[in-house]
Image (cartoon, rainbow, N blue to C red):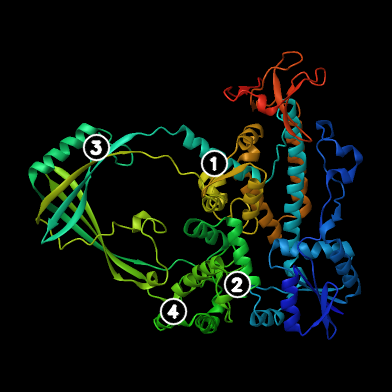
Amino acid sequence: MRLFLCEKPSQGKDIARVLGAGQRGSGCYSGAGTVVTWCIGHLIEAAPPEAYGEQYKRWSIEQLPIIPERWRVEPKATTAAQLKTVKQLVGQASELVIATDADREGEMIAREIIDLCGYRGSIQRLWLSALNDASIRKALSALKPSNETLPLYYAALARSRADWLIGMNLSRLFTVLGRQAGYDGVLSVGRVQTPTLALVVARDREIARFVSVPFWAVEVALSAGGQSFLANWIAPDGCTDDAGRCLQQLVAQQAVDRMRAAGSAQVMSVETERVREGPPLPFDLGTLQELCSRRLGLDVQETLDIAQSLYETHKATTYPRSDSGYLPESMSAEVPAVLDAVLATDPSLRPLMDQLDRTQRSRAWNDSKVTAHHGIIPTLEPAKLSAMSEKELAVYRLIRAHYLAQFLPHHEFDRTTAHLLCGGQNLQAIGKQVIVSGWHQVLAVPPADDVDSESAPRSQVLPALREGLSCQVGQVDLKALKTLPAKPYTQGDLVKAMKGVARLVTDPRLKQKLKETTGIGTEATRASIIKGLLDRGYLIKKGRAIRASEAACTLIDAVPTAITDPGTTAVWEQALDMIEAGSMTLDTFVEKQSAWITQLVQQYRGATLSIKLPEGPACPLCGSATWQRTGKTGPFWSCRSYPECKGTLPIQQASATRKPRQIPK
């Protein structure tokens, strides 16, 4: 029997249909000597510490570190019935095809079952980038040998064990230390979640420390040849900050007076540059999440769910968890089929389609830049727009637009910079005149949103200016402004920061190493990391922004810098890439992680944390200070002398006006 092992039921149904295995069974499809079954995600999971000994049921520093000699797994209770089905089918199989998602986690989902069952037969790998029938048939005709993707499993297993070692040991360590300092909550530490949280805490604290500085700008309305335009005053050296902003009101006011008195401005120089902008790449998941957060207000997990639905349910787009926006050069042969499918999906695109150059190859087609997955693009077969929700349709249109943009001309405009002199004051006017709309007609770009300010001059068309021309001065506006703090992270901003973590690292050697890595987490995990921090209450939504909670600040202050430093986790991701490439073994990686955890536990087991706690009322029995604890019915105030004194008070009796107190070291 030939068995196809998929990741989820819908995937199994699609593959079974193409294989002609149409007979539905319990947890599988079968037909013509072929059976298709599925895993519903991970059917097994790493066993908790208590599985290695009863003593680990109680959290105690003395028992740390917990380093398993032989790693154990156990079935997930919610999917135990499907695991039984899969184990039975694997035991009957003479050939097995791994058909889970084409990434590290997909590889692990299948291989952990194969290992659990002790399967020793033939294994091949189905590598799918889309779930439409044509893509499935193409992948079935090009099955990969088992050993080609086996390193993905080792990398995923290394990630899983590192997460276990860090999460189980350090969460226990710092939670116990926190309780000793009076903090009653769990201080959850994670290999990726903690440095991600540190990014938000650092941004929030930067905003809180920010001191606004006043500055002054001058905008001058000019006209020449009957056409009006705006110019900005260039403040002289000696009164500006590093950004060229004038910090002295008197200097700005004097400039205004002189320009008003002058009445005219003389053009000193005019330079015009033709700028050609190529289209943005097709989406990788992170870039899609960033743009959907900014444009559509979607959470990053919501964007991933929608992209997964477009791939899995609607068969409208390709595999979503891609970390590359580039396309294999071989896929250029599929361009006509993809464009025909897009038109069949939405006939209203006919006028635009007639403008596309189907033979044009943008920078997106580049084999050297494609990773395990290519950019997210429309599939080879038509989809039904009527079946999509409003949000699905919006995301699909973005994905479609980025693909269609590859076949339109470059966006071209003339950028003109004019320098003028008015009453002895320097002015600068910048103009932009679009020459060729190009790909902008399919992918509208807000001037201050998605285009770098360097390439986005003021949206005004300057009149025909020449050196020596005199321009009439109209209104001269003095603007009193203030410097603004950095904005709080949105979810999309945080994904971008996780990807570009190298920018936040100061060590030059580490920075260089990180430039080619994917930063914190992966395309497949960043959304779940952010969701987990929200679910734990470490992050709080405030409109589109996300802010760190008091518990988050407590955690980041408590754990060592090595855990919060984004450079550390990015180096770990690099090590996982090395395992995937075969240049590091799973055992070597886990041994290094175990040694590092052991060192941290030894270093911090006797530490005393300094934690800010809300001040409670005096104990009703002995008059001592109280601190907040959590019981079966929720939080309450407990005497700090507990268990010697068992005085308690309801939480609402605390003084709302008292400030947090610092527990001394």
Alpha carbon distance from label 2 to label 4: 21 Å
Q: Residue furthest top?
A: 622
Q: Secondary structure at mark 4?
A: loop
Amino acid tagged 2 = Thr
Give the vertical position of 212 relative to 453 (above or below): above
Residue position for label 1: 507
The quarter holding residue 49 reads top right
Alpha carbon distance from label 3 to label 2: 54 Å
Residue 318, which numbered label? 2
Alpha carbon distance from label 1 to label 3: 33 Å
Earlier along the polypeptide chain: callout 1 or callout 4? 4
Q: Residue at x 59, y 43 (%)?
A: 540
Contact (Cβ within 8 Å) of mark 2 with mark 4: no
Determine whether, in the image, residue 571 is placed left or right of residue 644: left
Q: Position of residue 329 (x, y in %)?
A: 54, 76
Amino acid tagged 4 = Gln
Determine whether, in the image, residue 402 is placed left or right of residue 159: left
How packed is label 4: few (under 14 Cα within 10 Å), some, or many (20 or more)? few
Q: Residue at x 75, y 58 (%)?
A: 154
Contact (Cβ within 8 Å) of mark 1 with mark 2: no
